[in-house]
Amino acid sequence: MLAVADEPALAELLAKPVSLAEVVLRLRTLLRHAGMDVASPGPSLVIGALILDEGNHEVTRGGRRIDLTTVEFDLLRFPMRTPARC
């Protein structure tokens, strides 16, 4: 395990091997909590606290990642893209 922390209270344990996508997501979250603007590499759909990042195929709610299958991601994306039809 790899410990990542600025302060002991913020320590997180990452099990190796760590995927690059998880590292990027955690870095974005840390930067966002630090008040820094974090640009996403692709278009994002946002409804309230739910963010669907089409460029990275990632979904977060309240800053926490939600793991979805490809089918689940596509099923969630449709109503977010076309809310008037749903």
Image: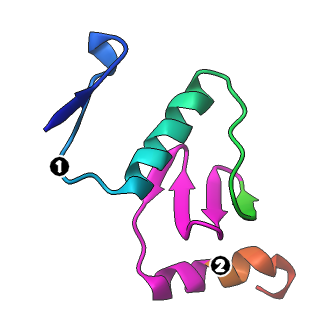
Left or right, 10 with respect to 44, comes to left
Residue where numbered disc 1 is placed: 16
Is residue 60 a member of the stretch shown in magenta? yes
Left or right, 85 with respect to 67, comes to right
Residues rendered magenta in the picture: 48-76
Residue sitting at 72 percent across and 62 percent down?
Answer: 44
Q: Between disc 1 and disc 2, whose residue precedes? A: 1
Picture quarter with the C terminus: bottom right
Q: x%, y% of residue 51?
A: 64, 57
Q: x%, y% of residue 12?
A: 27, 31
Residue where numbered disc 2 is placed: 77
Q: Residues within 10 Å of mark 1 (few under 14, many from 20)?
A: few
Above or below residue 48? Residue 83 is below
Query: Quarter-wise, where is residue 79 in the image?
Result: bottom right
The residue closer to the viewer here, 12 or 64, is: 12
Q: Amino acid at mark 2?
A: Arg
Q: Amino acid at mark 1?
A: Lys
Picture quarter with the N terminus: top left
The secondary structure type at the circle numbered 2 is helix
Above or below residue 64? Residue 36 is above
Q: x%, y% of residue 38?
A: 68, 39
